[in-house]
Image (tube, grey):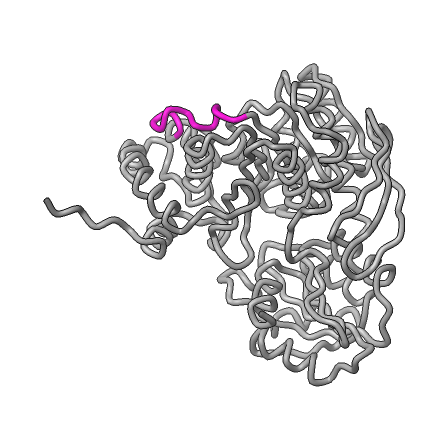
Amino acid sequence: MRREKYMDYQEALEYLLRFADYERLPRSGIVWDLKRVERLLARLDNPQRYARSVHVAGTKGKGSTSAMIASILKHAGYKTGLYTSPHLLSFTERIQVNGKPIAEEDWARLTEIIKPEVEAENRIGDLGELTTFEILTAMAFLHFRQVKAEYQVLEVGLGGRLDATNVVQPQVCVITSVSYDHMDVLGDTLAKIAGEKAGIIKPGAVVVSAPQFPEAIEVIERVCREKGVRLIKVGQDVTWERGDFNAEGQHFKVSGLKEEYELWIPLLGEHQMENAANAVAAVELLKDKGAKVPVEEIAYGLAKVSWPGRLQVLGKEPWVIVDGAHNAYSMQRLGQALKVYFKYDKMKLILGFGGDKDIAGMAAEAVKITGDIILVASRHPRAVKAEVLVEEFKKLGVTPRVAESVKDAIKLALDEAGPDDLICAAGSIFVIAEVMEWVK
């Protein structure tokens, strides 16, 4: 009997990208509705309910914090799923178990399983078609159930309240630093944006919040009161203190709710110590809910965390660094971190931005870092043409150069840089992914 031919990974990916992919398409006119993904998950017997959940929202640091929590739980002996977005080099990075991306054959197999359910749901059509992200989210839950994950750490894709991940009943919610981003969808004030992020908070959970601007923390505090949940504030209830550092990582101390921790992480930047404090607080609260995580496994899990593309050193003499800074606040933090963590003579910035970003705000922060700027557009369909960006910088008194591609930009920068100089690529995760591809 002849076996029917199944999709391979590339065919499965092409199928998934046929749907509305709002990472690549304009988001105007979207109907955000959790009922679509809830009905799809019901067809799959609600796999999102299988594992205990940690849900992480925020503007900056939610991916790093998610990866840290997952690494701690893994090293404490729990089979742990991690769902993040976007990816750097492969879609498979988005769905991980115990730090390993899903195998391409498993990705294809899951697509085969979910395809008839997606098409049955879309035939009803009363809520509009499922999006690529909604289908990927359902695939992640399905995979975590199939491998019998004990915990699933879920990074919100966009916002929180109406994000496809917001179908779980989490034990712990984490809200990392909230700043201006995706204002076309989330609102034009920090209070509105924080309200969308706080939409993940549910009765029965415990909430960890990173240090926030006053307008954001007021909203988070109000939602916690309304839901009757406990709020732990990192920076007040849980604090950190910097130690020494080098190009490979940094030592620091965290004073948690239960213990004092001497820690090292292979990630640079003050913000990564903040993210680690978020992760420590979240894991301590999971321990209150029955998780068995020894102190030494918290330290070991953080020491072994992998989260590429965040203030990552790709080369020395000259320094070649990539960072996922993609809004004005994170560009400001990047500038501060480069001054603290690296010694260099001259700096060049390679920058490219997405069309949905605060370009004026990022440009204003970038020119404070250096006047030597090379603008590019990544291959991503939402990338803004470098020629368009030039005008934004000229308003600030800086005339940047334009490269035809990310590859051309990094080659130009390397040709000009001396051994004591620094080259940093930022502004879009898609730009840094192309730099990483070229360097590798």
Image position, residue 135 (x, y; %): 41, 40
Task: Work out which quarter of the rendered image holds the C terminus and state it.
Answer: bottom right
- Asked whether, in this view, residue 85 is left or right of residue 263, the answer is left
**Count of numbered badges drawn on the protein:** 0
Q: Which image quarter: residue 318?
A: bottom right
- Name the spot of residue 7 as percent of width and height, x first: 28, 51
| Image height of 345 relative to 109, above or below | below
Query: In this rendering, is residue 291 above or below 99?
Result: above
User: Is residue 50 on the magenta stretch?
Assistant: yes
Observer able to see residue 349: no
Residue 52 percent across, percent down from the top left = 56, 25
Q: Where residue 40 sits: x, y (%)? A: 37, 31
Q: Nearer the viewer, residue 179 or 435?
A: 435
Magenta range is 41-51
Residue drawn at x 33%, y 38% as measured from the top left? 114
Q: Relative to the observer, which residue lies in front, 297 or 227?
A: 297
Q: Quadrant of residue 253?
A: top right
Left or right position of 273 against 28: right
91 or 105: nearer the eye? 105
What residue is at 85 percent from the left and 45 percent from the top?
A: 252
338 left or right of 324 in image: right
Residue located 31% across and 36% down the image: 122
Q: Residue furthest bottom?
A: 415
In the rendered image, the quadrant that contains the N terminus is top left
Q: Is residue 218 above or below residue 108?
A: above
Q: Is residue 79 visible?
A: yes
- 347 within the magenta span: no
